[in-house]
Each structure stands twice: as structure tokens, then as C-alpha cells.
């Protein structure tokens, strides 16, 4: 009897244990891990593809891709820059001032703020000034298209930096278009896939108020669908008004409620401002982060090991590409193909930030400014 009782108890315990494992395996996920025997070769294929893509993005560029002269000379023409209220736009304004000098262009700056209303007002102001050209930053087509088309009809050349949703024409152009932003989204996603071995659980923050948001998200989702269909992606909407105020606690609260999330992707790195401190206060560890265009603060986070990786793109170079483009439009040419997807994108991890961050740019190609001016000066501009 004692033997039979013990046998029954063992059998019952085995059944209960199996039931418990089955229930736990189904909680919070549609995928159940079956151990090493259930290894999926497709995961290895996806991880290998992700590693190959990010390896290409980690190679430092060596040329700006601009060699064609600008004809005729554009000296004396006036270009209005609509400067938004984030640090990247301040860098653009300073870089435009420098890039205008060798071409003899005159710069006028109009503050455009960060709201739809302020964008509309800035566009109206620029139009009323009747300049030869206008350069703007990431104003969505829903806000900018009509006024930009009206300016183009008046003979004003219009260039936007990172507004891939714009409808382009002979007088309306964009620097860093859909292919570039898709590549940026793919690179951030593939970095998490490669780093996690194909098992990433990600919080993705997008700012849909900006024109490049949809293209970045498209690239990110394409990468996960192709290389890691088993990865988990949580999406959270935000905007620049939450930077350093609402957003740090918003992220830490989400991570507390979703402890399986181990990666945070943001569309642009400034969204991570204040996040390391918020995570430390909440006692959250083991989170890896990546974003695009790391600011000086983000670069300092990376040096301190508080931010994992970034998509570096020289903000100053963006402005020089815009200068090249508006000058060509004003001289009756079309933009060079390189400006749609320029070599101004490099994935770097925290250990690669060896310089001392002095501003929100980074050491790009040595002597890149001279590469632009060499082409421009070839025709006496």
C-alpha cells in the first residue's frame, strides 16, 4: 500500500507539474519555447541577414558623393531657413551660414517653432519675403505642401531636410528621402535582432508629428518581418514636447509594466534625454537603447555606458547637402541623386564614441566640407 500510494502521489505530481508548465508557457506570448530541440534554422538565417546589414552601416563613409559643378553661379541670391526649435536645427542654421559663404549666398533665418501652427506661420512669413530659395526642416507635407507649391509657382526654390512625404517638383526638393529613412529604420531594428540573437522584445517610440516618421517605421517593420518574425515590438507614440519632461517617466513606467522588454528604439535620440536617470530611479536595469542623430547629451550617455548605440548622421552635413540642392534648383538644375540617400549614416555602438562630445554632431568624413567646395569652386561659383 505504501508503495502504491507513493506511486500515485508521484504520478499526480508529474501531471500537475506538466499542467503548470503548459499554462505558464502560454501566458503573455503566442510562442512557446520547446527547448533546444525546437531550434528554428530560420532564426539563424534572419540573424545572419541582420548582422550583414548592420555591418555595412558600420563602415565609415569616405566621400560625400558631390563632384558635379553648379552652373551658373548663384552668388547674391537670398535663401530663407525655417529653423525649428530643437538642437539639430540650431546646428543646421550654423552650418548653412558656413556653407553659404563659398557660394556667396545670403541667409535669412525665420524661427518655425515645433507646432503645426508655428510651422504654418513660418511658411507664410517665408513666402511673404519673396526670397530666391527656402530651406526647412521635417515639416510634414500635410502642413507644408500647399505653401511650398505656391512658392515654387512664384519661382522660389524650396528644399526640405528630411521630409520624405513631400510631393517633389522642379522647384520642390528634399534631402534625405524615403530610401534613407527606411534604411535608418531597418538598421535600428536589425541591431536589436543581431544583439538579441533573434529574440528581441522591443519598445519602439515614434513621433508621428514629424514627416519622416512613417518611412522610419516602415523600414523598422520590414526588418522585423523579414529577419525576426518572432520578435516582439511594442509601439508608443510621443512627440518632441515630451522630451526630458513627460517622456522619461513614460518610458520607465512602460518598462516596469512590461518587464520582458529589453530594448528601446526611438526615432531620434533626443527622445532619450533624461531616460537614464528615470530608469535608475525606478531601479530598472538591463535595457539597451538606440536612436538616430545622437545629440551631445546622447553622446555623453554613450560614453558613460547609459545608451547603447546610435545612428550617427552629421547634422552639419545635412545642411550642406541642402545648400547644394537649393543652389542647383536656383541655377536651373535638378538635385543630384545622392541627396535622396546620402552616405551620411553610420551605426556606432557606445564603445566607439571615443571623442569628447562638444556639440550635437560627430566626426564624420575628414575634410568633408572641402569635398563640397571643391565641386562648387570648379566653376567659379
Image (cartoon, helix red, strand yellow):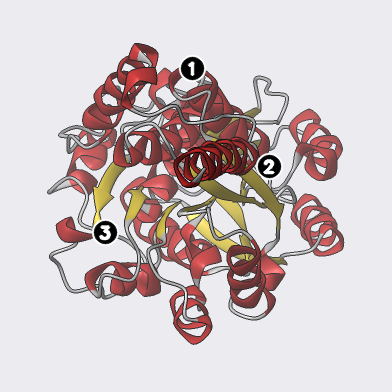
Whether residue 105 is visible here, answered yes or no, is: yes
Q: Which residue is mark 1?
A: 226
Q: Nearer the viewer, mark 1 or mark 3?
A: 1
> Horizontally, is 293 left or right of 208 in the view?
left
Q: Is residue 29 above or below residue 315?
A: above
Circle 1: element type? helix
Q: Which residue is mark 3?
A: 362
The answer to which of 223 and 295 lies nearer the viewer is 223
Residue farthest to the bottom?
A: 281
Q: Which residue is mark 2?
A: 211
Q: Residue at x 51, y 38 (%)?
A: 4
Circle 3: element type? loop
Indicate which disc, 1 or 3, sits on the residue closer to the N terminus: 1
Q: Distance of mark 2 from mark 1, alpha carbons?
A: 25 Å
Q: Residue at x 84, y 61 (%)?
A: 121
* Residue 60 falls in image quadrant: top left
Q: Distance of mark 1 from mark 3, alpha carbons?
A: 31 Å
Q: Residue at x 74, y 43 (%)?
A: 140
Residue farthest to the front?
A: 1
Q: Position of residue 289 (x, y in %)?
A: 41, 57
* Residue 233 falls in image quadrant: top right
Q: Is residue 118 above or below residue 277?
A: above
Indicate which disc, 2 or 1, sits on the residue closer to the N terminus: 2
Circles 2 and 1, Cβ within 8 Å, touching? The answer is: no
Q: Position of residue 339 (x, y in %)?
A: 43, 29
Amino acid at each position: 500500500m505504501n508503495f502504491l500510494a507513493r506511486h500515485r502521489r508521484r504520478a499526480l505530481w508529474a501531471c500537475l507539474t506538466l499542467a503548470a508548465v503548459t499554462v505558464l508557457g502560454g501566458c503573455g506570448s503566442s510562442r512557446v519555447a520547446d527547448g533546444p530541440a525546437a531550434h528554428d534554422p530560420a532564426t539563424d538565417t534572419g540573424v545572419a541577414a541582420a548582422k550583414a546589414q548592420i555591418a555595412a552601416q558600420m563602415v565609415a563613409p569616405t566621400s560625400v558623393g558631390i563632384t558635379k559643378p553648379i552652373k551658373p553661379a548663384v552668388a547674391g541670391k537670398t535663401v530663407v531657413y525655417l529653423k525649428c526649435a530643437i538642437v539639430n536645427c540650431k546646428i543646421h542654421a550654423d552650418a548653412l551660414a558656413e556653407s553659404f559663404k563659398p557660394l556667396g549666398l545670403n541667409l535669412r533665418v525665420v524661427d518655425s517653432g515645433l507646432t503645426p501652427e508655428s510651422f504654418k506661420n513660418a511658411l507664410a512669413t517665408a513666402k511673404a519675403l519673396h526670397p530666391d530659395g527656402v530651406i526647412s526642416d521635417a515639416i510634414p507635407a500635410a502642413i507644408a505642401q500647399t505653401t511650398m507649391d505656391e512658392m515654387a509657382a512664384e519661382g522660389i526654390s524650396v528644399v526640405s531636410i528630411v521630409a520624405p512625404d513631400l510631393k517633389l517638383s522642379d522647384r520642390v526638393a528634399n534631402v534625405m528621402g524615403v530610401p534613407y529613412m527606411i534604411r535608418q529604420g531597418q538598421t535600428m531594428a536589425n541591431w536589436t535582432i543581431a544583439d538579441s540573437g533573434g529574440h528581441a522584445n522591443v519598445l519602439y517610440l515614434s513621433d508621428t508629428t514629424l514627416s519622416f516618421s512613417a518611412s522610419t517605421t516602415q523600414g523598422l517593420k520590414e526588418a522585423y518581418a523579414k529577419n525576426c518574425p518572432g520578435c516582439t515590438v511594442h509601439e508608443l507614440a510621443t512627440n518632441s514636447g515630451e522630451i526630458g519632461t513627460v517622456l522619461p517617466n513614460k518610458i520607465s513606467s512602460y518598462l516596469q509594466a512590461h518587464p520582458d522588454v529589453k530594448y528601446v528604439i526611438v526615432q531620434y535620440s533626443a527622445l532619450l534625454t533624461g531616460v537614464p536617470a528615470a530608469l535608475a530611479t525606478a531601479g530598472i536595469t538591463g535595457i539597451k537603447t538606440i536612436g538616430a542623430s545622437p545629440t551631445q547629451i546622447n553622446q555623453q550617455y554613450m560614453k558613460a555606458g547609459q545608451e547603447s548605440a546610435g545612428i550617427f548622421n552629421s547634422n552639419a552635413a545635412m545642411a550642406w547637402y541642402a545648400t547644394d540642392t537649393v543652389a542647383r534648383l536656383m541655377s536651373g538644375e535638378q538635385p543630384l541623386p545622392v541627396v535622396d540617400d546620402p552616405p551620411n549614416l553610420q551605426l556606432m555602438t557606445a564603445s566607439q564614441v571615443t571623442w569628447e562630445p562638444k556639440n550635437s554632431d560627430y566626426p564624420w568624413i575628414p575634410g568633408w566640407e572641402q569635398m563640397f567646395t571643391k565641386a562648387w569652386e570648379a566653376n567659379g561659383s
